[in-house]
Amino acid sequence: MTDFFKSRLFVISILVVAIAATLPLYASGYVLGLLTVAFYFGVFAMSWDLLFGFAGEVNFGPTFLIGVGAYTAGILNNLYGWSVYLCIFLGAMAAVVAGFVLALPALRLRGPYFGLTTLVAVLILQNFVVVFAGLTGGEIGLTIPDVITISANINYWIALGFMTISAAILFGLSQSPIGLVLQASGQDAVQAGALGFNIVKHKLFAFIVSAFFSGLSGALLVFYFGTASVGTVVDIAVGVNVIVAAVLGGRRTVLGGALGAIFLIVASEFLRPTGELATFIVSTVALLVVLFFPGGFLGAALSREART
Amino acid sequence: MDARTTSPPTLQVRGLVKRFGGLTAVKNLSLDLRDGEILGLIGPNGSGKSTAMKSIMGIERPTAGDVVFQGENLAGLPAHKIARKGFGMVFQHSRPLNRQTVLENIMVALLPDSLLMLLPDKALIERAKWIAERVGLGAVMNRRPPTLPFADLRRLELAKAIARDPKIVLVDEPFAGLTLAEVGTFSELIRSFRDEGRAVLLVDHNVKSVAALVDRVLAMYLGEEIVTGRADEVMRNETVRRVYLGGALETHARPETSFKDQVPALEVKDLNVHYGKAQALENVSIHIHHGEFVSIVGLNGAGKTTLFNAISGFLAYGGDIVRDGEKLRGISPAKIARSGIVQCPETRELFGEMTVRENLDLGGQHLSDQERERQLTWLFELFPILKARQDQLAQTLSGGEQQMLAIGRALMMQPKILILDEPTLGLAPVILEQLSKALEKLRQTTPITVLLGEQNVTFALPHADRVYVLEHARIVWEGDPGRFAKEAGAGYL
């Protein structure tokens, strides 16, 4: 851990964040807006990697956690007009509770069944949003009266700061003793048990941490957008993008998730002139990376460093 | 004998039972283990010894019985709780954390089961270093597991198991995959655990491999204890000898000179196979004549299945496998099977949710309808029970019936060379007799060449024309079955 502060990865990360922080001084509002969304997405992907890369559990429903956080925050603000920050906090807490309620029974299942459970949870949430349209805004989307700020610059800095702090916490956790035990249980649950570790407890903890950051990020995102809709925070396709971002960036690296998310969002935007082709091209790149460099961007770089 | 026998046992297992569905893997097992003692739990594959060990550790939940440790009954607790009471287990297969160093891997084992520890403390690192030195990993503790030789990975498993200073150490097949020199070093290590006052329980296949190491041996067969005692007593025990060597054997070997073929049906020359860093086969050479019945005798882990899988084309190998003078390298497993080398695998690999008849029809899929009917009629004469069970799902059959179906499905492919891998695995003696009769009929009435891999000598010898003994990846004996008991039997116990 102490070595980390001297490592190349740490120096590069600090540099990248420092440069990114100066962007509002010269970049256009369009670029800032794009990156603001990408940063929130980065937190989704990093939270997901904590579960997949370390605990070894494939959560096919990251948007269940994101969506619960986003809609709870939005609905509370819409109904009661509570302060934005209270709503964001309560959104994150709602995601934690929902994550706990889902994971407690689901973690008893083995193999693909855990993943399937999380997938079904997304469908249920999606249905809920549509059926209770009076509360949620249904398919049209939920209008949120308040925003954090209308300044593009401040919104950008909030997102960057939030992503940086989340990355530091999630990465630190992944490198801590808890992260080691998680990794051991993900790799061989029987052996980790025989070494005296309560697997369910550790995995549940990982799920709750993942839920907290997903929900928090989802809540922040809706207050940036000023609206919450199924298409932006709940749909399976959004979840797939989160997963692709994390895998693209590099499994078991945490930070890779942020890289992958930024790549995915920026690349889609750059390719926008190609119309429908954009999604196709980005998906193809993602598929090629997963097929030929399963370690992802950062995984490939890190393993090269480890070999030397 | 000394203080050991008079002090109360640290671990008392009483009436341990483990059932999986209809199968009783461990039946009413009782054992005592004292501080500073090594007990060997011995039995052939499928005898329930590993299940017994897992039930003690809490990896499997015992169906009934007590596991009393220092006066406290631990039966039914989950593994992580039992581990914290003072149990450590050495696993046969290691899956270390590949991105962490050896030292960090050992540190994982030392961590508390807590969500509050965010930084490892200094004392923990010192302790991990000490353990690394203790098991002989001192020189490599800053390397990552993928760069280590196989024996060092096994050392890492030992290190993790003793990390938290357990009172009881359980070891699953301590010497699997190790060279003879490494076996010596590992025996020394395990002995030193005992000398520190720990109680050690070893699981292995035969008495011989652990005789020099253990204080006492408990021999198991079909889930039950046969006998407990000193290693030499157990090796002299009549029942143990019968389980491993068979009783008075009646053999019907045809001398090798009676096979007049110029080119053998199958010839394996200097075969070498590696699984990662472990050598599974070392310079193995065998040959089989047309129509001959050859048995490969060897304990679990000796390399039988590896040999068969290499012949069937599933594995990359060094050396050559030659059939009727033609090398098989590069031919796909499907083509090899279709050309008449058919393997009936140890794991049976039946299609559980298909009926018996569908399984058989799949085997005979390449035959014309008329031919398939004829083959089926012949097969039902060989295994009448399959005819009665035709419409039943394969997974609902008993173990013995499943084995018959697996052999039947292989026979539907009209093999020229039939490879049977451990057909007796986990089967009761009465079923063995039926299988035995079927094999005899096969040998008498068909020209099929048979290659049988077995650890059950009683089953393997009676039909064999010739026997090879495979031990630790090498062929150590070849001869006719009549001479087996005299020349190779002692080494096999």
Image: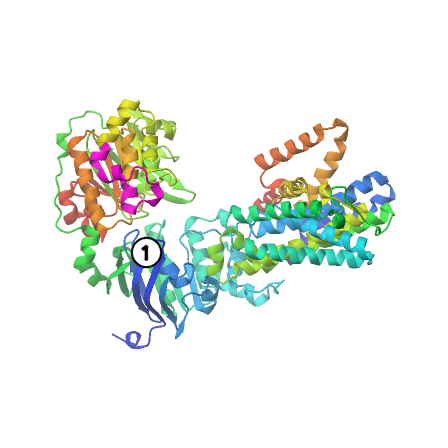
- Do we see residue A260 in this rendering? yes
Q: Amino acid at mark 1?
A: Ala
Residue B246 rendering spot, x and y as whole percentages: 17, 50
- Do we see residue A8 in this rendering? no
> What span is colored magenta in the figure?
B379-404
Colour style of the rendered protein structure: rainbow
- Which residue is located at x 15 percent, y 26 percent? B260
Residue B430 rendering spot, x and y as whole percentages: 20, 49
Residue tagged 1: B25
Q: Quadrant of residue B287?
A: top left
Q: Residues within 10 Å of mark 1 (few under 14, many from 20)?
A: many
In the rendered image, residue B380 lying in the magenta stretch gets the answer yes
Q: Quadrant of residue B224?
A: bottom left
- Quarter holding the C terminus of chain A? top right
- In the picture, measured across the screen, residue B136 lies left or right of residue A235, that is left
Residue in the foreground of this view, choosing between B192 and B469: B469
Helix, strand or loop under label 1: strand
Chain under callout 1: B
- Which residue is located at x 25 percent, y 74 percent? B1
- In the picture, measured across the screen, residue A214 lies left or right of residue B352, that is right
- Quarter holding the N terminus of chain A? bottom right
